[in-house]
Image (cartoon, grey):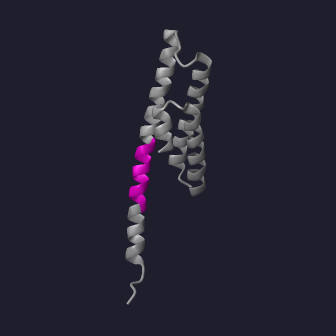
Amino acid sequence: AEINRSYSESDYFRLWKAAHSLKGAMSNLGIMRYAAVCKAIEECGKSLEAAVAAAGDAPTEDDNRQKLEDERHKLGVYIELLAQQETEYRQHYAAFEKRVLEAAPKKQ
């Protein structure tokens, strides 16, 4: 939620910080594909934060504007991938939880 909100508000500092925190949590849980996407979002957010700071909020040169738009598009793709990873993780977790409950001894 924080990553999506930060992205929609173009708050790249908050975005990369949230991605960094989530990356650490996912790494600690051993969910490395999810952590890798978080790392890509973190790096992209840092890049955008630096580019916006260097160019100002409204870059005047077409080349700079295009670079910012390209980087923002790439970030959007990573965020979409993160959502897909989250959906996949939730499905796997639900299936695992179901198997555990089915295997548990029944109380009489």
Q: Residue at x 50, y 47 (%)?
A: 34
Inspect the magenta stretch and tell me whether residue 67 lies in it.
Answer: no
**Total tally of numbered discs in the picture:** 0
Q: Residue 78: image x %, image y %?
A: 47, 36
Q: Residue at x 55, y 32 (%)?
A: 12
Inspect the magenta stretch and tell me whether residue 85 lies in it.
Answer: yes
Can residue 99 be seen here?
A: yes
Q: Check the image and name the residue furthest to the top.
A: 61
Is 28 situated above or below 49? below
Instruction: Between residue 79 and residue 92, name the one nearer to us.
Output: 79
Horizontal side of residue 50 vs 9, given as left or right: right
Q: Residue 91: image x %, image y %?
A: 38, 57
Q: Residue 23: image x %, image y %?
A: 57, 46
Classified by dominant secondary structure, the portion drawn in magenta counts as helix
Q: Quadrant of the C terminus?
A: bottom left
Can residue 42 be seen here?
A: no
Is 28 situated above or below 79? below
Q: Residue at x 39, y 62 (%)?
A: 94
Is 66 situated above or below 99? above
Horizontal side of residue 41 vs 76, given as left or right: right
Q: Residue at x 60, y 43 (%)?
A: 20
Q: Residue 96: image x %, image y %?
A: 42, 65
- Segment tinted magenta in the rendering: 82-93
